[in-house]
Image: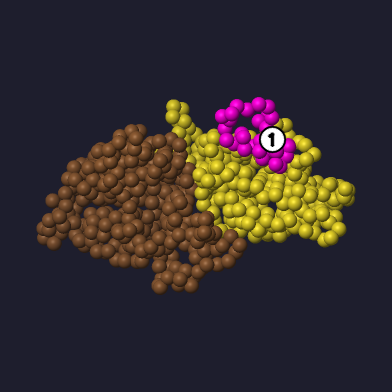
Chain colours: A brown, B yellow
Amino acid sequence: MSSCNNSACLNEARRVAIFGGTHGNEMSGVTLVNLWVKNSAEIQRKGVETKPFITNPKAVEKCTRYVDTDLNRAFTPENLSAPGGDNLPYEVQRAQEINRIFGPKESPDAYDVIFDLHNTTSNMGCTLILESSNDHFNLQMMHYIKKAIAPASCLVLLNEHPLLKYSTSRSVAKHPVGLEVGPQPQGVLRSNIFEAMRVILKHALDFIELFNEGMEFPPCTVEAFRVLERIDYPRDANGNIIAMVHPNLQDCDWEPLNPGDPMFQTFDGKTIHYHGSGTVYPTFINEAAYYEKQQAFVTTRREALVASAIRKV
Amino acid sequence: MEVDKVVCLPRLPRVAVCGGTHGNELSGVYLVRELLKAEKKVMEKEEEEPLSVLMVLSNPRAMQQCRRYVDTDLNRCFTHAKLNGPIPDDAPYEIIRSRELNATLGPKGNPEAVDLVCDLHNTTANMGLCFIAYSDCDWICMHIFRHLQRQMPDVPMRYIHFDVSNKESYSLDSVGKHGFAMEIGPQPHGVVRSNIYTAMKVGVQHMLDWVRIFNSGTIFEGGCVDVFTMIKHIDYPRDSETRNITAAIHPQVQDRDFCLLHPEDPLFQTFSGETLRYKGNEPLYPFFINECAYYEKGIALSLARKRLNSGIERFLDLKG
């Protein structure tokens, strides 16, 4: 990244991908990408090649999150270089294929931007997921989107926690953007959720077009929620869940959780309280897919991320 | 309209509460697991016989995988035809399981069958608490429903009737002498929401309380229950080649289960933004609006007529 006149000069974003069906039962992304594969007029922008792509077609066909293993955890260096071809789990094969088409990951040939479309059963509204606080292009894009959809809300979740971050399908690109919209049950298509995701993508592509045309984006601050910790459900000695998200916490994504607040309710009605050292902002509260990943919710803290001015080289 | 006749019905010594008939409908799964932990025979007063409550986890393999079913929908396996006759060794898991359940809780149609089956379900539709039954004149089920309505006034509650003959009845609750499904939503599959779980737990408790009160010889006054009788289903508009859906439930209908739908009301919104309207010729009550599991069954929503059933009779039990 070179600096010219206090702006960071970045290459144009010429190659953009929109991934749907990374989880085969998250229907907004599946539906949007299928629509755009048939007719891409809506996602075309001057000077940008935008490719809609179904990342996990077998899971989409079965309307299941994954077939063998979670595709959105599969893009590790070990998996991407694993030999074995057809003997590898289906999603590892897919990861290698996606890395060939849209990567290679961390090489100059990788796609500039990948938007990965997801739904959640959590009441997260529209959330943009950032993997690095140093990605000024992404920060500026997210700032642009938030302003464009105001007063409607779109929050930014930053996951660069060394232990909790994971190897997503979008991580193949130079600028990975996760788009998570909820609440929506798995396997269900809600028109309000579908339209919200569509609008966010429209603004994201508009930003890329403006950037490529030479618009300079001045320095800005982006409010984000940084992932701190994963909290599991209380379990018994056999690993069975013994409590549910407390009614006071259910659906309260992004709201402050203070020490002493109710957090879980056992099946026989007792309250379990949060005993952290300070106020946190929980999210991904009661996401269906995370029961098996030992996660009832994640805690975050609010942080103002600073983005340098950017313009194209 | 009050009816002065008193109907006598036999007591109900054996009740089954079933969860996990669909393995990803988690309120019933967790509730039955919890009740199994605390399982005890309930002893009534000395002269009374105990109420025997069987707690059953209907589809353990599907529960283990957190899926609706493994091979085929268990809750469609209980027709007389499917329960009887020869089956191959590699029969679908749920066909084998349905016969095991029929042996434990039935046999269906036989005097040995349990007196009441309450089968616990969740739906992604915004239906509140619903009883789903094959009969609109099963006084046991209707009195239990009315009891729950009175004990749980803050929970929206409806009684749904599927007009299916005993010969054609296909669900687990049809195995008992009386039976109904207790369906509660909205809850995503694979998730347990504390408010939904609690409503189910309290509903089951009140149901069992009612049975004990009934078995003790109480007379219940007659009264009225609104019954929603299923008339038809409507599928999503689909692409003729791929069969993929081409529209979503319209935002004005989404989450509005049991709000009357009139001819020409918006029904679907296509992905290009066009509104498709309801083309029926009578206003009907929609339910199971956008139930996840029904996409593959070709059902976007179901439609019902509402009728005030004023015939639920007074009755007491008949000993011996």
Question: Whole-percent x and y of residue A298?
Answer: 41, 60
Which residue is at the front of the view, A68 or A29?
Answer: A68
Question: Whole-percent x and y of residue A132?
Answer: 27, 57
Task: Report whether residue A43 is seen.
Answer: no
Which residue was labeled with disc 1? B169
Magenta segment? B81-108
Image position of B132 with respect to A129: above or below: above
Q: Residue at x 38, y 45 (%)?
A: A70
Q: Amino acid at mark 1?
A: Ser
Q: Residue at x 33, y 33 (%)?
A: A86
Q: From the viewer's perspective, tell me whether residue B316 is left or right of residue A92.
A: right
Q: Is residue A277 magenta?
A: no
Outermost residue, left direction? A4
Chain under callout 1: B
Question: Whole-percent x and y of residue B68?
Answer: 54, 42
Which residue is at the front of the view, A121 or A208?
Answer: A121
Which residue is at the front of the view, A63 or B92?
Answer: B92
Q: Residue at x 58, y 60 (%)?
A: A267
Image position of A137 with respect to A84: above or below: below
Which residue is at the front of the view, B284 or B104?
Answer: B104
The quarter of the displayed image where residue B289 is located: top right
Task: Report whether residue A184 is seen.
Answer: yes
Question: Whole-percent x and y of residue A289?
Answer: 45, 50
